[in-house]
Amino acid sequence: MSASSPRLLVTGAGGQLGRRAVELLLEAGVPNLVAASRDPSKLADLAARGVETRRVDFDDPASLAEAFAGVERLLLISTDSLGAPGHRIAQHRAAVAAAEAAKVKHVVYTSAPGARPQVGGGVIDDHFWTEQALAASAIPGWTILRHNLYVELLLMGAGQAVSSGALYSATAGAGRAYVSREDCARVDAAALIKGEGRQILDVSGPAAVTQDEIAVLLAELSGRPVTHHDLPADALRQGLLAAGLPPFMAGVLVDFDASAAEGQHAIVTDAVEALTGQAPVSVAAFLEGNRAAFS
């Protein structure tokens, strides 16, 4: 391994974001690439393409130490352990400690907009304390990428909104700069290759779009009337619970809307184009391309 081709590792390579980041790195001809997952057997197709695979279990610090050995640059994708308060932050702190012990030179971390402490913990709280762990570490460089909400999340409720004619949120009329998972994967891969220093970047779509505007788009694309109804946070929570969502997931979605209502999701940056050379997809273009999912 030469100084010009450091060993790069992507955690969560069995998931949608991590796998796509690995694929993009492969397409770019990046050498010395390691894909890591709790179950490396899920990465057999990547191994067949020349990618080294390693086991990473965020609940097993020994696996982290072994996986990060010899790695110079690490893409740390936040885990999906959302059900038990404190679980995910413990996982992330273990990963940061392992990266520091392995003398990883640069860590790229997938965070969220408006990362801040929350009473009782939560998704945003996890991201805040992970960012703090990186800042307090002796890791020479890190790039924190605060991904805005995926535009793909709109498809979860678009069909119901079109069929019922009603779209509900607790965003208080504020906009959200939705970004596609594909654009996030492109940014993550680019930052893993060339991120420098210590920096925090908001990763957004091209514009902050309100739920009123989304209702108009859904109506135009489906040919059926859709009206947005803004609710108090508690009313939205009760509605999500009544619809059968698990309490922790309802809490996550309400937290996201509360953050949007505060303006935390309305930050628009050029991070996608600056890092990848390609502008991010808009909400309108995304919904147009996925019209079949709701109409």
Image (cartoon, rainbow, N blue to C red):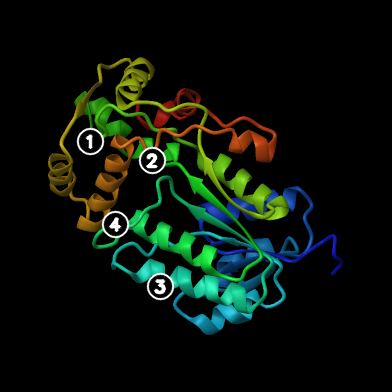
Q: What residue sits right under mark 3 in the picture?
A: 90
Q: CA distance from mark 4 to mark 2?
A: 23 Å
Residue at x-position 35% and y-position 70%: 87
Q: CA distance from mark 4 to mark 3?
A: 16 Å
Crowding at dot 3, Cα within 10 Å, few <14 / some 14-19 / many 20+, comes out as some
Please provide percent x and percent y for residue 173.
Answer: 27, 26
Q: Name the element at disc 1.
A: loop
Residue 38 visible in the displayed image = no
Q: What residue sits right under mark 2 in the picture?
A: 153
Residue at x-position 44% and y-position 49%: 112
**Number of the front mark, 4 or 2:** 4
Q: Earlier in the sequence, mark 3 or mark 2?
A: 3
Q: Determine the residue located farthest toward the bottom in the rendered image.
A: 62
Q: CA distance from mark 4 to mark 1?
A: 18 Å
Q: Earlier in the sequence, mark 3 or mark 1?
A: 3
Residue at x-position 39% and y-position 26%: 209
- In the depicted view, which residue is nearer to us: 220 or 228? 228
Please provide percent x and percent y for residue 109.
Answer: 54, 57
Q: Is residue 261 above or below residue 10?
A: above
Q: CA distance from mark 1 to mark 2?
A: 15 Å
- In the depicted view, which residue is nearer to us: 157 or 250? 250
Q: Amino acid at mark 1?
A: Ala
Q: Amino acid at mark 3?
A: Ala
Q: Quadrant of residue 69?
A: bottom right
Please provide percent x and percent y for residue 163.
Answer: 24, 27
Q: CA distance from mark 3 to mark 1?
A: 30 Å
Q: Amino acid at mark 4?
A: Gln
Q: What residue sits right under mark 4 in the picture?
A: 118
Please provide percent x and percent y for residue 272.
Answer: 60, 37
Q: Earlier in the sequence, mark 1 or mark 2?
A: 2
Q: Earlier in the sequence, mark 4 or mark 2?
A: 4
Q: Is residue 285 above or below residue 34?
A: above
